[in-house]
Image (tube, rainbow, N blue to C red):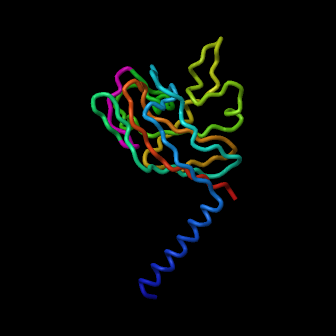
Amino acid sequence: MKLRAIVERGAAVLALVLAATAANGQTVIVSVPGNALGSFGNPSCCSVPFVTALAVSGPGTFTVSYISGTVTDSGGINTGPNGALWNVTGNQFPLQEALGVSGGPVDDFDSLIGVFVPRSRVLASGFSPVDGTKGTPSAPKVGILPTGLVFIGTGRTIVAEQAGTLFLGINDDNAASNGGAFLVSVTFVPSS
């Protein structure tokens, strides 16, 4: 078989696969601002809640893909979705909070992060897409648990085993000087 025929058949198969995905899936474009920290990290300052990317009614697979944009921070730091190297002194970034560690060098400062939250938690009275561990006994927060946070960077596939919502944010603990945003596409394909 000639190379051209192989390439043409491959392209036709790829087009059919993409068409099937588009027909059965759902894609949204989401902007994640540089101050969407969801109050994660310790101490946390000046942030807004995580961004709702997509709510789904059952199991399936999310694919998050970076399109464009940067996040700016103090001192002229301008990062893409994979983040930058930073030495954390005395503070804790969200992905560190997820692991129960703090301080030291991180290579994902201001990176794109996310979390899938089951529908039962999202529908709980008082839920907000913020750190659910920072309430007080008299005013408990119903939010996102840090242990579910994951690095997304330029792209990641996340399997949802049930109905729920994918939220996106930034790996930083202080949004006072943050600017910019990441533009991403989020595609969900339900399990068959």
Task: Give the extent of the magenta segment.
Answer: 80-90
Tell me the quarter of the picture where residue 72 sits.
Answer: top left
Q: Residue furthest bottom?
A: 1
In terms of depth relative to the viewer, which is nearer, 53 or 136?
53
In terms of depth relative to the viewer, which is nearer, 67 or 164?
67
In terms of depth relative to the viewer, which is nearer, 144 or 52?
52
Q: Is residue 32 above or below residue 144?
A: below
Q: Residue at x 67, y 24 (%)?
A: 126
Q: 37 left or right of 148?
A: left
Residue 34 painted magenta: no
Tell me the quarter of the picture where residue 164 sits.
Answer: top right
- Which quadrant is the C terminus positioned in? bottom right
Q: Is residue 32 above or below residue 4?
A: above
Q: Position of residue 162 (x, y in %)?
A: 69, 45
Q: Residue at x 67, y 55 (%)?
A: 191
Q: Position of residue 70 (x, y in %)?
A: 37, 41
Q: Position of residue 94 (x, y in %)?
A: 47, 30
Q: Position of residue 104 (x, y in %)?
A: 35, 28
In terms of depth relative to the viewer, which is nearer, 134 or 127?
127
